[in-house]
Amino acid sequence: MATDVKIVIKNLDVLTKMADKFPAISEKHINNAIMRSLAEVQRQAQPITPVKTRRLWGDLQIPHLSPFQGWIGSNLPYAGFVHNKWDAGIRYRNPSLNKSAVAGFLTVAVERGKNVINDIFKRALDEIVIAIAK
């Protein structure tokens, strides 16, 4: 999918410093936070993803993870077109069988889930501090 949707994490600078100083401890907690954040984006996106054949939603099911990073998207050739057809948040018109679908569904999902995502990363930071203190 050609569209990037950025997630802004509060206290990212603190997490980055912790990862630099204690990479072995931080990696586990940060990767877990990334995985849980992607799951939250999926959870928020599912009810608002345009549906005609379910291929697009099925392709979004698999998050891609590597140390200290992750992304969710689609490799379908039409995914970017479907996502960007109209401005984010505008109710998706035909051809969608999902009457709750909106354009820019991943952008909207990130916006809806940003508080939960920030809580996930706050918890990861707390867990890193606790692990370092042990």
Image (cartoon, rainbow, N blue to C red):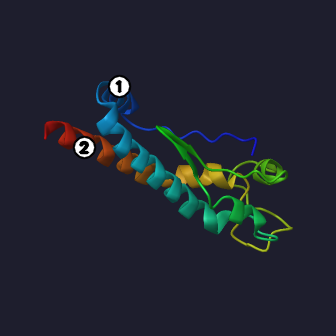
State left or right for residue 119 relative to residue 102: left
User: Depth check: 34 or 43 in front?
Assistant: 34
Taking the spot 67% from the left edge, 39% from the top edge, the residue there is 4
Q: Nearer the viewer, mark 1 or mark 2?
A: 1
Location of residue 26 with respect to 20 vertically, above or below: below
Between the residue at mark 1 and the residue at mark 2, the CA separation in whole angstroms equals 16 Å
Q: Residue at x 31, y 30 (%)?
A: 18
Instruction: Tell me, for residue 126, which label it has, or none.
Output: 2
Report the residue that reaches farthest toward the left: 134
Residues packed near mark 1 inside 10 Å, few (<14), some (14 to 19) or many (20 plus): few
Q: Position of residue 40 (x, y in %)?
A: 50, 58
Which amino acid type corresponds to the residue marked 1 in the rendered image? Asp
Q: Are marks 1 and 2 in contact (CB under 8 Å)?
A: no
Where is 76 relative to 5, above or below? below
Q: Give the x, y percent position of residue 91.
A: 74, 61
The one of 66 and 53 positioned closer to us in this rendering: 66
Q: Quadrant of the C terminus?
A: top left
In the rendered view, does 90 fall on the left or right side of 112? right
Residue 78 shows which numbered tag?
A: none
* Residue at which label 1 appears: 20
